[in-house]
Image: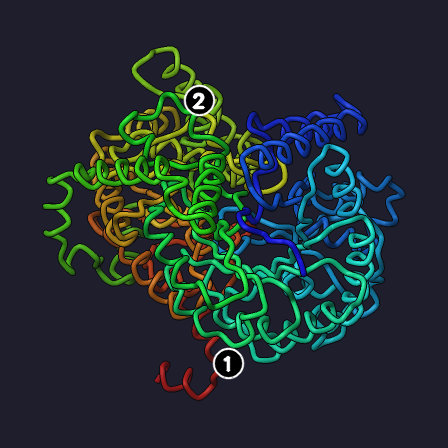
C-alpha cells in the first residue's frame, strides 16, 4: 500500500525570490564566477524550496523541479540525447548543457517553443533514429538524496517519456517519415533504470508529467501513452507512479492512464473546459489516487475555497484517495504577493502568488481530510475577501458604455488594394522604418519606472536619440540586434511600458516569472476595466521624427499580445478585456496618426503562443484576437500603413493571422516585411499544394 499524497503542488518556481538563479547564470556566462559558485547557488535554492514547502504543511513535497535552464533540456541530457555538434566541442557536462541551449560560435543552439499555452519557452531537443538513448545523468537521484539529507522526503518530478518525445524534433538527417516518438521503446529503458534507482534511494512516489495530452492527440499517440505506462508500471522495482496531465482538459488521457497499473493520476480541474464531471465515473480509478488540480497554477487570483471543496466532494468515491494540488506547476506565477507593498491594498487580498497558493492547497487538503472546521478561520477569511471583491467590482461605466457602442463598422478597413494605392502615393515603401520606441522603452526598463520626474524623461529622450542615430547608420533591423533589448525582451518591455500607462492594469516590482533560461519577465496584472487616460507614445515617436528625415514608425503591443503577456481577470471574459484594450489602443493609434505618423505597428508577437491547446477553442481565440486587432487599427485613413509583427510564428500561423488581422505589412523573426498582397499569393500557393482543385476554384 503506497502512502497518501494528501496535499501537494505539481511544481514550484526555480529562479529564486530575488532572481538569484538568473543573476548567477549571467555571472557564469560572462566569466565573472566559476562553476562551483553557480552550483552553490543552485544548492541553496533547492534547499530553500524543499524546506519552505515542507514547513508550509504539504503532505507531499515535489522534488526535481529545479533546473539550471529548462526541464525538457534536462530530460534530453538525462537520456543522453546530446547531438554530435555539441559533443564535438569537448566541453565539460555543464558547459555542454548550456551550449545546447544557447549555442556557441561553432554550434547552433537547439530550438525553442512555447510550453503549452504559457509564457514559458522550452528547449526543443533533436532525436534521430540513431541518437543514443541511455542513462547519462542521475540528477533526479542525486537531488532526492540531497533533500533526504536535509530531512525532507520529496516526490521526484520528471517529464513524462511520451510528452518528452512529442516535444522533440527529428534530428537533421533523419529519414522521411521518422518521428521522435518512434524511439519510445528505447526511452522507456532509460526511465526504467531511473525508476529503479529512485526506488533504491527510498523514493515512495515519482511524478511523471504528460501535458502533451491536454492537447488534441491522435489515437496512435494515446495508444503510445497507455503502452508506455503499462511498461513502466509493470516493473517490479519502482516507486508508485503519479501520471500528471496539467494545463488543460485531461479527458483524452484520463481513460488511457486509468487503464494502466499506475497508482495515481493528477488532473487539471480549473481550465475552462475541465470539470469534475470529466473524472467522475472513469473506469479504473477506484484503485488509484486522484490528485485534483483545484488551485490555478497559471493565474494570480485567490481561489474560491468553498467552490473548490464542492468540486473535491463530487470526486469522493471516484478513486481510492482524492488529494489536492495545483492545476500545474507554480513555475508560471511569481513567488510572493507579500513582497509587493506598492500594489493597491484593495487588490492585494484578492491575489495569490506561489506561496499563497501553497497555503490554499494545504487548507483545502486539511478541509477535505479532516473537515472544514479545522480550517474555519482560513475559509472565513477567503469568503470575506471574495465578498468584498464582488461587492465593489473594478468596473468603469465609461468603458462599459463605450463597449456597448461597438459596431461592425469599427472592425472594417477599406479593401487592401485601395489602401495600398493610397499608401504608394503618400508614403514610403513598406521597407522597415525606424523604431524610436526601442530606445525609449530600453531606457525606461533600466530605470524601472516612469512619471513626471524629468530625470527619467531625459533618459528616455536620450535613448530615443541614440537608437535613431544607430538605426540611421546601421538600418532598423541591424539596430534592433545591436540595441540592449533584442526582440523578445523589447516586446516584454513594451508591454510593461504600455500597461503602466493604462488604467485597469497593475505592475509588480518583484513579480518575476521565468520565460526561458535566464530570461525572466514581470507580467502586468489586469485588475479592472482598461482605459487610456492620456497618450502613451506620441511624445516619443514625434520627437524621434523631428530628429531624422527617415520614416519613423510607432510600435504598440496588440490587445491579444498584451493579454498573452499578462495575468488576466478571472471575473470578466478575456474577450471583453481584449475589446477594452482595443479601444484604448485605437485612441493611441488615432492620436499618432493625427500627429503625422504614417507607419504604425501593432505587434501580435505573443498572441499565437498563448492560444488554447484544443483546435476548436483555438479557432474562437483567433476570432476574438483578430476582432480586437481590427478595432484597434481600423480608425485610421487608408494612407496610414498598419503593420504587425508575429515574431517567430510559422508560415501557417503567419498566413492565417494576416488574413484575419488584415494589416498592410506583416513581419516576423528572420523575415522581411510581407505585404497583404504577398500573403494572399502565399496562401493561394499553400492551398494549391494541399488542395489543387479548391485553389483552382478560388482563382477562377
Residue 51 visible in the displayed image = yes
In the drawing, does residue 452 fall left or right of residue 366? left
Q: Residue at x 83, y 52 (%)?
A: 200
- Residue 252, above or below 204: below
Q: Residue at x 42, y 30 (%)?
A: 337
Residue behind mark 1: 690
Q: Residue at x 84, y 42 (%)?
A: 93
In the rendered image, residue 470, in percent from the top left (x then y), is placed at: 52, 28
Label 2's element? loop
Q: Residues within 10 Å of mark 2 (few under 14, many from 20)?
A: some
For the residues labelled 1 and 2, the Cα–Cα distance comes to 49 Å
Mark 1 or mark 2: which is in front?
2
Res 482 quadrant in image = top right
In the rendered image, residue 507, in percent from the top left (x then y), is placed at: 37, 30
Among the two numbered marks 1 and 2 on one chain, the one whose residue lies closer to the N terminus: 2
Residue 605 visible in the displayed image = no
**Colour mode?**
rainbow
In the rendered image, residue 116, in percent from the top left (x then y), is placed at: 52, 56
Q: Quadrant of the N terminus?
A: bottom right
In the rendered image, residue 642, in percent from the top left (x then y), is placed at: 32, 49
Residue behind mark 2: 448
Amino acid at each position: 500500500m503506497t502512502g497518501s499524497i494528501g496535499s501537494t503542488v505539481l511544481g514550484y518556481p526555480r529562479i529564486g525570490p530575488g532572481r538569484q538563479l538568473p543573476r548567477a547564470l549571467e555571472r557564469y556566462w560572462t566569466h565573472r564566477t566559476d562553476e562551483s559558485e553557480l552550483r552553490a547557488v543552485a544548492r541553496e535554492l533547492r534547499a530553500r524550496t524543499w524546506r519552505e514547502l515542507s514547513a508550509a504543511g504539504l503532505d507531499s513535497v515535489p522534488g526535481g523541479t529545479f533546473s539550471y535552464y529548462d526541464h525538457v533540456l534536462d530530460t534530453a541530457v538525462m537520456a543522453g540525447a546530446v547531438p554530435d555538434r555539441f559533443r564535438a566541442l569537448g566541453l565539460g557536462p555543464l558547459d555542454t548543457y548550456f551550449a545546447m541551449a544557447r549555442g556557441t560560435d561553432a554550434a547552433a543552439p537547439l530550438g525553442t517553443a512555447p510550453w503549452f499555452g504559457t509564457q514559458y519557452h522550452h528547449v526543443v531537443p533533436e532525436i534521430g533514429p540513431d541518437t543514443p538513448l541511455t542513462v547519462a545523468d542521475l540528477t533526479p537521484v542525486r537531488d532526492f538524496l540531497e533533500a533526504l539529507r536535509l530531512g525532507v522526503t520529496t516526490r521526484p518530478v520528471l517529464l513524462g517519456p511520451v510528452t518528452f518525445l512529442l516535444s522533440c524534433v527529428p534530428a537533421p538527417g533523419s529519414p522521411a517519415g521518422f518521428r521522435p516518438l518512434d524511439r519510445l521503446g528505447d526511452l522507456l529503458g532509460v526511465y526504467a533504470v531511473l525508476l529503479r534507482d529512485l526506488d533504491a534511494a527510498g523514493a515512495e512516489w515519482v511524478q511523471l508529467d504528460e501535458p502533451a495530452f491536454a492537447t488534441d492527440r491522435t489515437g496512435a499517440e494515446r495508444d503510445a501513452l497507455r503502452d508506455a505506462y503499462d511498461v513502466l508500471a509493470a516493473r517490479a522495482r519502482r516507486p508508485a507512479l503519479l501520471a500528471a496531465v496539467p494545463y488543460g482538459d485531461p479527458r483524452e488521457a484520463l481513460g488511457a492512464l486509468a487503464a494502466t497499473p499506475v497508482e495515481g493520476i493528477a488532473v487539471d480541474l480549473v481550465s475552462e473546459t475541465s470539470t469534475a464531471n470529466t473524472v467522475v465515473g472513469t473506469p479504473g480509478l477506484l484503485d488509484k489516487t486522484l490528485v485534483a488540480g483545484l488551485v490555478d497554477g497559471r493565474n494570480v487570483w485567490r481561489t474560491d475555497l468553498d467552490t473548490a471543496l464542492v468540486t473535491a466532494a463530487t470526486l469522493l468515491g471516484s478513486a481510492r484517495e482524492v488529494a489536492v494540488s495545483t492545476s500545474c506547476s507554480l513555475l508560471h506565477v511569481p513567488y510572493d504577493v507579500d513582497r509587493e507593498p506598492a500594489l493597491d491594498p484593495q487588490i492585494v487580498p484578492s491575489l495569490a502568488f506561489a506561496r499563497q497558493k501553497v497555503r490554499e492547497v494545504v487548507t483545502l487538503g486539511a478541509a477535505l481530510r479532516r473537515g472544514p472546521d479545522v480550517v474555519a478561520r482560513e475559509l472565513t477569511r477567503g469568503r470575506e475577501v471574495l465578498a468584498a471583491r464582488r461587492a465593489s467590482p473594478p468596473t468603469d461605466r465609461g468603458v462599459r458604455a463605450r463597449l456597448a457602442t461597438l459596431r461592425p463598422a469599427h472592425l472594417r478597413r477599406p479593401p487592401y488594394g485601395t489602401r495600398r494605392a493610397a499608401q504608394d502615393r503618400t508614403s514610403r515603401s513598406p521597407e522597415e522604418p525606424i523604431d524610436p520606441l526601442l530606445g525609449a522603452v530600453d531606457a525606461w526598463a533600466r530605470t524601472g519606472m516612469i512619471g513626471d520626474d524629468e530625470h527619467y524623461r531625459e533618459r528616455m529622450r536620450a535613448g530615443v536619440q541614440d537608437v535613431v542615430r544607430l538605426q540611421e547608420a546601421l538600418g532598423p533591423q541591424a539596430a534592433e540586434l545591436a540595441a540592449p533589448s533584442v526582440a523578445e525582451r523589447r516586446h516584454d518591455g513594451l508591454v510593461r511600458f504600455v500597461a503602466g500607462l493604462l488604467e485597469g492594469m497593475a505592475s509588480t516590482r518583484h513579480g518575476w516569472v521565468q520565460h526561458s533560461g535566464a530570461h525572466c519577465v514581470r507580467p502586468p496584472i489586469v485588475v479592472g476595466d482598461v482605459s487610456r487616460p492620456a497618450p502613451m507614445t506620441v511624445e516619443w515617436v514625434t520627437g524621434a521624427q523631428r530628429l531624422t528625415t527617415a520614416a519613423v514608425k510607432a510600435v504598440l503591443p496588440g490587445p491579444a499580445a498584451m493579454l498573452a503577456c499578462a495575468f488576466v481577470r478571472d471575473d470578466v471574459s478575456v474577450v471583453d478585456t481584449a475589446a477594452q484594450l482595443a479601444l484604448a489602443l485605437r485612441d493611441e493609434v488615432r492620436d499618432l496618426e493625427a500627429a503625422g505618423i504614417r507607419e504604425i505597428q501593432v505587434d501580435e508577437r505573443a498572441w499565437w503562443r498563448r492560444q488554447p491547446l484544443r483546435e476548436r477553442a483555438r479557432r474562437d481565440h483567433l476570432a476574438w484576437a483578430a476582432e480586437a486587432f481590427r478595432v484597434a487599427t481600423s480608425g485610421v485613413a487608408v494612407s496610414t500603413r498598419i503593420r504587425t509583427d508575429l515574431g517567430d510564428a510559422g508560415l501557417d500561423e503567419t498566413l492565417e493571422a494576416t488574413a484575419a488581422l488584415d494589416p498592410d505589412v506583416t513581419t516576423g523573426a528572420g523575415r522581411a516585411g510581407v505585404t497583404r498582397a504577398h500573403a494572399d499569393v502565399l496562401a493561394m500557393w499553400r492551398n494549391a499544394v494541399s488542395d489543387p482543385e479548391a485553389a483552382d476554384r478560388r482563382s477562377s
